[in-house]
Amino acid sequence: MRIALFTNLDLHSNLAINFLIPELVNHEFKLFLSEKVGSAVPVIPPLQFLDYLERKFLINHLFPHLERNPKSEFLTFRQIDTKYNTGLAFIKDVNDPDFLEKLSVFAPDLFLVIRFGRIFKGKILTIPKKGIINLHSAILPDFKGVMGTLRALLSGASHVGATLHYIQDDNIDTGDVIDVIKMEKNTEKSVLWHIAHLYPLACVKLRYIIGEISKQNKIQSYPQPTGGSYFSFPVQSDFDALRHQSMKLFSKKEYADMLGEFYQVEKKWVLETIGKDNEAGQLPEEF
């Protein structure tokens, strides 16, 4: 089976791909990246902190470190491309006719979409005959849009989740649901920890689904229930409310622990590198 994987240049996307590799290696797959979700530059400190931890630290430090010291089982995007010949490409306009022509030559059977920062419209929706599956890091239809895990935690929910669903038109997070994966809220852990640990759980299920599709087995799905809400990027008052609930957005120590867990890098190196990095600015120990 030929698979086109659309994802984003960030921590959670990279974790997701690494957890999908055991199934992806059974297929021919191409890798397409967006550089970020949304076009606006983060302007409030909490979003700047997240952008650093989820994206800038990886680009400037973690990925170069892993490529210089290739000991981790988890690979950077470039290492994945080199090892599996994915034709890695950054996509600014996923609906551009020239891109669609090249994509049609590959003739993918299935699209997988994980945190991809562009909206599919028109012709591209018709290309994969086995459909387009999106991994949304929140429970649908309750939390459509951006940073659904944060919204779930702010709502006081006892658990967070991820939804595997089809993309069937150019609406956002509205397609038929294949499965919902849930994880109990841990009040001792940060929002960033919850997001990073949701993707592995969802990708284990997604691996199974990919395998079933490749065997021509029918995948059960159902229309989303009505209701729910769409959320855009959070504002300062949302982060104030999070702190009022005594929950953290992130913790440096926890972040170093996560990178050590997933990428087998030294936690001391992570913390020292953040401390020396001008891009980190005034990144607090936790927020």
Image: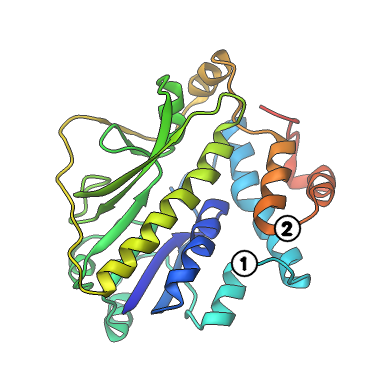
Residue at the spot 23% in from the left edge and 60% down from the top edge = 121
Q: Residue at x 31, y 79 (%)?
A: 1
In this rendering, does residue 115 appear at all? no
**Image location of residue 61, percent across then percent down:** 74, 58
Image point (56%, 24%), residue name: 187
Residue ID for mark 2: 264
Residue 146 higher or lower than 9, as above or below? above
Disc 1 packing (10 Å; few <14; some 14–19; many ≥20): many
Give residue 225's position: percent from left, percent from top. Answer: 16, 36
Residue type at mark 2? Answer: Gln
Q: Residues within 10 Å of mark 2 (few under 14, many from 20)?
A: some
Q: Secondary structure at mark 2?
A: loop
| Distance from Cα at disc 1 to Cα at disc 2 | 13 Å
Tag 1–tag 2 contact (CB < 8 Å): no
Instruction: Please indicate, yes or no, whether residue 252 appears anywhere in the rendered image.
Output: yes
Against 225, is 31 above or below?
below
Residue 76 badge: 1
Mark 1 or 2 closer to N-term? Answer: 1
Disc number placed over residue 5 in the picture, else none: none
* Quadrant of image for the C terminus: top right
Q: Please give the name of the residue rendered at 73% of the width and 72% of the height, measured from the top-left corner.
A: 70
List the single residue furthest toward the top. Answer: 244
Camera-near label (1 vs 2) is: 2
Tell which of 264 and 42 is nearer to you: 264
Which x, y percent locates residue 237? 50, 19
Q: Name which residue type carries label 1.
A: Thr
Quarter residue 42 falls in? top right
Q: Quadrant of residue 2?
A: bottom left
Is 52 placed left or right of 236 in the picture?
right
Decide if residue 167 is on the left or right side of residue 162: left
